[in-house]
């Protein structure tokens, strides 16, 4: 199992999100957004699971969730679900060219700029129709 110091963890996270600096890692740890650190020998260290938590926290934060709501959500989720949320982090990065469209309060669609305007409209309209309980045909 891989173990990390707070500095090492923040450097890994900063590769994809400049907002995840050492201060943020320590703050999220201090307020209990992540599980307690592992004890290895006489040192407390972060693990890959902590990395998953931090990625999920940033993803949910960028999606507009408050830290309190994030803490409540993550506190009841299995690590596999937390990992899946963290894998979505690239979609919330401001430097990507993708467009995210809010269909309703529960559904966001992120589309590549390579998709034509016509197809984009068809996708959005189809999803909206499905959500209303109708057919797309």
Image (spheres, rainbow, N blue to C red):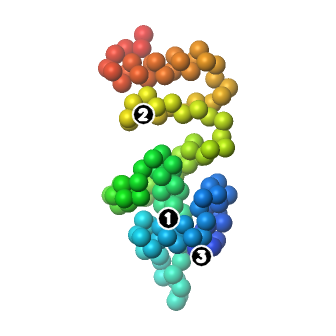
Residue 23 in view, yes or no: yes
Element under label 1? helix
Question: In the displayed structure, does residue 50 sit left or right of residue 130?
Answer: right
Q: Which residue is mark 3?
A: 5
- Mark 3–mark 2 distance (CA, rounded to whole Å): 37 Å
| Tag of residue 107 | 2
- Mark 3–mark 1 distance (CA, rounded to whole Å): 13 Å
- Closest to the camera, between mark 3 and mark 2, is 2
First of labels 1, 2 by sequence position: 1
Element under label 3? loop
- Closest to the camera, between mark 3 and mark 1, is 3
Residue at image location 64% in from the left, 63% down from the top: 12
First of labels 3, 2 by sequence position: 3
Residue at image location 43% in from the left, 23% down from the top: 127
The location of residue 133, given as percent across then percent down, is 32, 20
Residue at image location 44% in from the left, 54% down from the top: 82
Q: Which residue is mark 1?
A: 49
117 or 36: nearer the eye?
A: 117
| Tag of residue 32 | none
């Amino acid at each position: 199992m891989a173990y990390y110091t707070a500095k090492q963890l923040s450097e890994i996270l900063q590769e994809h999100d400049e907002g995840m600096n050492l201060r943020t890692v320590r703050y999220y740890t201090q307020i209990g957004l992540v599980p307690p650190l592992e004890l290895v020998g006489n040192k407390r260290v972060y693990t890959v699971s902590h990395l998953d938590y931090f990625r999920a926290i940033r993803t949910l934060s960028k999606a507009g969730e408050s830290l309190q709501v994030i803490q409540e959500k993550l506190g009841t989720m299995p690590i596999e679900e937390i990992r899946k949320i963290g894998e979505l982090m690239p979609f919330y990065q401001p430097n990507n060219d993708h467009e995210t469209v809010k269909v309703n309060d529960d559904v966001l669609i992120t589309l590549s700029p390579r998709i034509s305007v016509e197809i984009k409209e068809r996708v959005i309209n189809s999803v909206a129709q499905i959500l209303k309980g109708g057919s797309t045909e």
